[in-house]
Image (cartoon, rainbow, N blue to C red):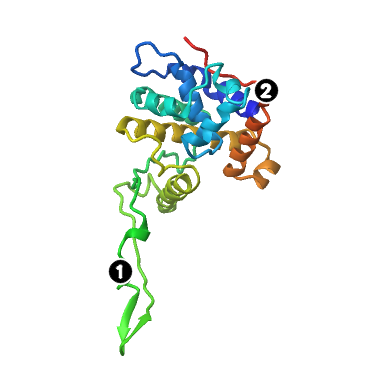
Amino acid sequence: MMARFYGYIDKVFRFRELASRQLDSRRKPLIPTAAVFGTAFAMFATCRGSLNGIDKERHFPGRLRNLVGPQVPSGDTVGRVYAQLDSEILRGTLRDVHLRIKRNKMLDQSAGWWFAAVDGHEFFRQPQAVLRAVPDAQLRERIAGAWKERAQTSSWCWATTFPRRLLPTRSLWRAGHWRWHIENGCFNDLSTHWGLDHVFKHAPTAIVNFILTLFLAFTLLQCFWQRNLKPPFRDRFTLIGLAAELYAALVRARHGRGARVPRARAP
């Protein structure tokens, strides 16, 4: 499965070329930047969740070497280099991938329009357990000395400057509801299962670069899941299941016996 995944993203998105573009500010690097990037990408693609999680694989010959080359960086090296990685190049890589997705007609359309929803996520929030509990006054009210639940209803509407002849009401409604796919299918899933809220390295540049790499790996996993796998497999496996299959393939690559995959070549 690992060789199939990397073969797909290299064929469709030229992954080796994208990995070779990455640069950092080290003057005489002993480990290529592409190898560092490839290790972080593999960490997210296999849903390891932390640098320590992927660092353990260095102790088994043949696992990460098939992905990143003979010089496998440690978890500490990945964090240190990611604090020096060029974020603009990484942003450009993510942009190129999405342009390819658009050209390959993988994005949904409504009434011939492309919609972009701007949303936000609160990273590294304070755990609720350390916050003082406050009664929910909107859902409970005190009646005759006792708290009782009461029903609460709400309504909302979408306002637009689009004329109806260009954008039908139902198309606008669908576009508005697609916004929730960003919240549930992106931020919620990434925070719960993929480590979006985990601080891999306490440096502003590293935080941004790890998030960008996570978005890139998550996007390519979805493309592979939707466009390369057969429906029976998709019916049985979620993206988390696919990540588990990739990790299982990584584990089977002991002592160099695993299938080799396309990887970035050192310049």
Residues at circles 1 and 2 in contact by the CB criterion of under 8 Å: no
Badge 1: residue crowd in 10 Å (few <14, some 14–19, many ≥20) = few
Displayed quadrant of residue 99: top left
- Toward the front, the furthest residue is 59
Per the model, the C-alpha gap separating discs 1 and 2 is 56 Å
Q: Nearer the viewer, residue 30 or 229?
A: 30
Q: Is residue 263 left or right of residue 21?
A: right
Relative to 14, say whether 211 is above or below.
Answer: below
Q: Which mark is residue 255?
A: 2
17 to the left or right of 79: right
SS at circle 1: loop
Identified at 67% across, 23% down, the residue is 255
Secondary structure of residue under mark 2: helix
**How many marks on residues?**
2
- Image position, residue 179 (x, y; %): 41, 49
Residue 13, how many percent across, how many down?
A: 52, 24
Front-lying residue, 28 or 235: 28
- In this rendering, position of residue 25 left or right of residue 99: left
- 150 or 212, which is in the foreground? 212
> Can residue 21 be seen from the camera position used here?
yes
Examine the image and state in which quarter residue 68 appears.
top right
Residue at 39%, 18% (x, y): give it: 23
Q: Amino acid at mark 1?
A: Val
Task: Estimate how packed mark 2 is, as few (under 14), some (14 to 19) or many (20 or more) residues with alpha carbons within 10 Å.
Answer: few
Label 1 or label 2, whichever comes before in sequence order: 1
Instruction: Name the residue located 40 percent from the left edge and 36 percent from the top edge.
Output: 200
| Closer to viewer: mark 1 or mark 2 | 2
Residue tagged 1 = 134
Percent from the top left, x then y, of residue 25?
33, 17
Q: Nearer the viewer, residue 185 or 195?
A: 195
